[in-house]
Structures are given as structure tokens and as C-alpha cells.
Image (spheres, rainbow, N blue to C red):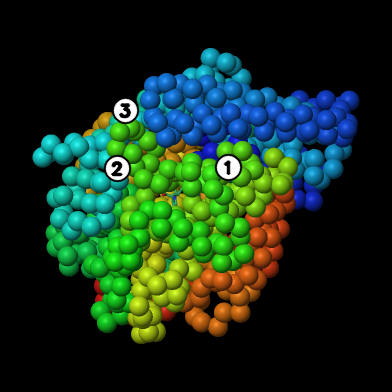
Amino acid sequence: MKSTLKLTTTAILVAASLSACNGDNTTKNESNPISVVDQALTAQDAEKFLIQTEKELVKLNLEGSRAAWINANFITEDTSSLAAEADQKSTEAGVRFAMQAAKFDKVNVSDDQRRKLNILKQSLVMPAPQNSEKSAELAQIGAELNSIYGKGKYTTEAGKTLSLGEMTATMATSRNYDELLEMWQGWRTISPDMKPLYIRQAELANEGAQGLGYADLGTMWRSNYDMPADEFAKELDRLWGQVKPLYDDLHCYVRSELGKTYGEDKVPQDQPIPAHLLGNMWAQSWGNIYDLVAPEDADPGYNLTEQLAKNDYDEIKMVKGAESFFTSLGFDALPETFWQRSLFTKPEDRDVACHASAWDLDSKDDIRIKMCIQKTGEDFSVIHHELGHNFYQRAYKNQPVYYQNSANDGFHEAIGDTIALSVTPKYLKEIGLIDTIPDESKDIGLLMKMALDKIAFIPFGLMVDQWRWKVYSGEITAENYNSAWWELREKYQGVTAPVERSVDAFDPGAKYHVPAGVPYSRYFLAHIQQFEFHRALCEISGNTDPIHRCSIYNNKDAGDALNTVLEMGSSQPWQEAYKVLTGSGQMDATAIIDYFEPLHTWLKDKNQGKQCGF
Ligand code: X8Z
Ligand code: ZN
């Protein structure tokens, strides 16, 4: 399902954006070397082609989404096979559309037509070679990888069989070094079987990308941001450079607190942190170990998971709660079918793809989420994240199918998170989830919790695709898959495998987006963007509180501004959509840096005399 040309984005299907064409109505050969140009073609031919293709896309998308939905909700041989068939069909169509679109490279077409043609040329995430045997193989591999991940379980030494959800819960709450280690290692037993499939998938998709004129698949992925691929990679480095000093101080402080908890023999103070001690299966966000690092005297004094339980929040009430934030901004309530067709809890009797996702089946109103909700504060945020996708999908449904997508894929991931930044103590009190708003002396605690979730994530958000880009370019070869993964984990995150990894290990495969073929830079971007969006919406709402205490709840002006951007879909280069909200066409990390400034000052003080770095 990851490889379909799905111009309407679900969280897991292609986040199609478009290629660079700012102020230039012809495609540059550098980024689009498929130039089987037909000189006799005209703008009228382009129009005819785009109209016809739109009709085919609508049909393919609906068929593909239905097959993928059934497969993800009921993983069996049969549903995987049907999903693979649908995937093959839409990937083959996507490759055909891309090739046909390239024929208009030198034709004088309108800006709007050029944008649609470019979108067609760039939207496939897993392009297949033009050979039906190979496209069938690619689709089957994709289904198989998803199936291995979705069915993944581990039987403990004590003989108990655990799902990822159960292991995730233990990773979040256990403070027992050995128990954490068993969970961490246990989950990674699901992925060695993926490795041969992954090697072949990379070969086939690379061949597909090369057939479309790209050097490799990574270059194709990087070409989707209204700027040349190389510039995009540099943008990510620049943004990371802005955040890194704060990350380094957070890392230093957390490592020293973990040293106090587990002992400095277990957490050496001059080494990367063992990856199983950070409250999360992938050490990607660390909010679950807040209690271990909470600043003395600045604890806000509530725990959202406990407050949800005290207030009888079940899964549906959690989703209703998140929905009501969006409706408070002026968005219409979710349709009845959302409640009837979504999956909110993990069924006991079958395998489902539990990784949270948001779907838009028909580009009209059939929006849904699929999520095995746990009744935690963490999942309350994830629900806001998923609904952000759904409200986006509904807002751009009236765009032509080519533009039924976010401005860039980071936007899609950032919207719900932007809303979740407004889930502040003031808001929680307003909806009755807490009784008192902690005073400002507790701000460092609030900021610490948020930094563990957001700042800790940023280098992870970057390294996943650093790894894949190097795999696709051939710089990382199959025998080095795992060692290169850990080199990047150490380099960017300063975390390390807690035990030596065996030669068979394929640890990247234990992270959903790798077997699912979902590009990951989008989440890095989203973490930068959401703070810029939050700051902009807070300004529009007339906020006078410090930015980390601002909530846009109930503010229709902020809702209108947000809706303007959502409705645009991908009809404009993302820089234009960015300007609508932030006034600037360039991403910038100063909003996130400013947000955490009081914490950064505090961390620098606490880290004095400590040995930092990894
Ligand atoms: O995959 C997701 C969402 C669905 S698009 C739940 N996220 C990334 C992850 O879990 O790794 C959200 C944050 C990062
Ligand atoms: Zn998402």
C-alpha cells in the first residue's frame, strides 16, 4: 500500500508533493531526466491527459484504499494478496502516468498544468520497474513486509506472548534494566526475516526510480519539496544545526539522571545512552521517563494518563475529546461514518496493523482512523495527530485530485501536533481533566516533559532517512545495514544498542516506517514546523501568555487561518502555504528554540561541570 500513487494522502499512503518549478514553467533536466519529449504535443493535449488521468486516479485510489484498509484491519494471506494486487495496479498506472507526464516537459503549458504534471512525475514512493513480473514482485514484497511487522509478537523467557503494544507499555513504565532489555531485544526478533525482502525491495524500487530518470530512490524522495533534491538535504542539516545545541544539553542532563537511576556502570557518562532506557521502543521520544528526570520543585504535579483514568476516559471519549478541540476552532464535527468505520481498539481475535494511521477512502467524507489506542497521555496526543490528518484531508477534498495532499509531507504530520501543543494545563482545566493550573514556577517541568517528547525526537526524525538515502544510493550495502544504522543512531542521537547485535540483526526493520516504506523526513520537518505554526496561530489568537502556555482552544480566528492553509492542499508550492501562516517561505527552527529557551538556560546551569557529548 505504500507504493500506490495515492494523491490523496492517508498517513500511510504516498504523501505526494511536487517537484521544483518555482517561476519556471519548464522542467529542468537535472531533476527530471526522463525527457522523451514529444514536440508535437500542445497545452490542449496536456489538459486532455490531466482530465483523463484524474478520472483514473480517483478510481484507482478508491480501489487501492479499500484493499489496503481491509488488509491492515485483517492481516491474512488473502488480504495481503489482494492488497498487493491493488498496489501493483496503481503503481503500474503511476509509472505510466509519470512517463506520459514527462512527454510534456518541453511543451508550453500553464503553471497549473505544469504543477500537476510534475506531481504525476514525482509522487510514487516505491516506483516499480516497467516490467510486470518485477512490479508484481515489488508489490508482494511490500505486502509481506507489512504483514511481518503487523503480525510481530515476542514470547518472553517466562513463556508469555506479547504484542508490540504490550511491550511498548512495559518500555514506558518499567524501570527494571533487565526487563527493559528483554523487551528491546524481543521486539527486534521480528525483523531479521525482513532483510532479504528489504534488499530486493531496494533493488526493485531503485530500478523503478532510475527508469523515471532519478539517480536512485532517495534522490526521488528528496525531489518532492519544491526545491532541488540537494538543497533539501542541506535544509535538513541547517535546521538540525539550529536545534543540536539544545539536544546536546538535554542529552547530557538525561544521561546523568539515568546514571543515577541505573548506575554509571550501566550508563557510562562518556558514552551514548543505551537505547532501551529512554521509555520508548525506538528511543525516539523520551516523555515516558519524565519521572526519572523531573526537575525538583518544578513538577507540574499531574500525570495525564492518571487524569484520563480518574475522569473515566475510554478510547472513544479520548477521540471525542480531540475532535472537540478541532470543532472549537470552527471545523465541522467528524461524520457519523468516522465513528462507525474507524478502528479504535486492538481486536483480540486477529492480526491488525496497529501502528496509528489516518485514512481518506473516497476523497469526500469517508475519513477514518485505525489505531490500537492505549489509555495514556501519550496516545491522547497521537489521537490529536491522527485527527490532524483527517481534518486536513477533509479540508482539501474539493481540490483537483492532484492537489489533494498537504503542502509538503511535513505539513500533514504537523497539523495534529500543532493542535496538541495547545493541550496545556489551562486547556486541561477548562475541559475538566485537571483541577488546578500549576503556577509559573512549574514551567521548567512542563517544558522538560515537552522537550523529552519533541527535542529528543528530532535527531531520530533525521537519521532514519539518512540511513535509507544511503541504502538507496548504494553507500550502505546489505552487509552493513545494521552497523550503519547504529553508527547513525550514535552519531545523531547519541544512543547505542545495549547489547552487541548479531550478524543477522536487521534493527531498522523493527521500526514501522522501514518495512512500511513510509519516508521519515516528514516527521523531522513536522517537529520544526509545528512550533512555527503554533507560534503563528497563538499570535493570531491574541495570546499574551508565554508561548508554551498558549492554547488556541475556542479561537475561531486561529481556526480560520489554519483552515485557509489546509484548504489549499498542495495547489501551491509549500513555501506559499508556509507564508500564509508564518509570513515566511523558509522553515526555521527559532520558534522551537524560543519555546524551550527557559529550559535550555536551566539545562546549561544543571550541566555545569558535567562531561557532555557522545
Ligand atoms: O508514525 C507516526 C504517526 C502516524 S503518521 C503515529 N509518527 C511517527 C512515529 O510514530 O514514528 C508520529 C511521530 C513520528
Ligand atoms: Zn502522521
Residue visible at 30% across and 46% down?
165
Residue 365 quadrant: top right
User: Is 41 on the left or on the right of 203, as rendered?
Assistant: right
Q: Earlier in the sequence, mark 2 or mark 3?
A: 2
Image x and y of residue 530, in percent: 53, 62
Q: Residue furthest left?
A: 158
Q: Quadrant of residue 49?
A: top right
Quadrant (top left, top right, bottom left, bottom right) of the C terminus: bottom left
Mark 2 or mark 1: whose residue is earlier in sequence? 2
Taking the spot 53% from the left edge, 71% from the top edge, the residue there is 553
The residue carrying pointer 2 sits among few (fewer than 14), some (14 to 19) or many (20 or more) residues within 10 Å by Cα, namely: many
Q: Of discs 2 and 3, which sits in the foreground?
A: 2
Q: Which residue is mark 3?
A: 193
> Does the image show residue 128?
no
Residue 95 vs residue 248, the one in the foreground:
95
Q: What residue did someone put label 1 on?
A: 366
Q: What type is the residue that disc 2 sits on?
A: Leu
Q: CA distance from mark 2 to mark 3?
A: 17 Å
Up/down of 300 relative to 292, above or below? below
Residue, disc 2: 164
SS at circle 3: helix
For the residue marked with disc 3, what is the amino acid? Asp
Q: Quadrant of residue 33?
A: top right
In the rendered image, residue 250, in percent from the top left (x then y), is placed at: 35, 67
| Amino acid type at mark 1 | Asp
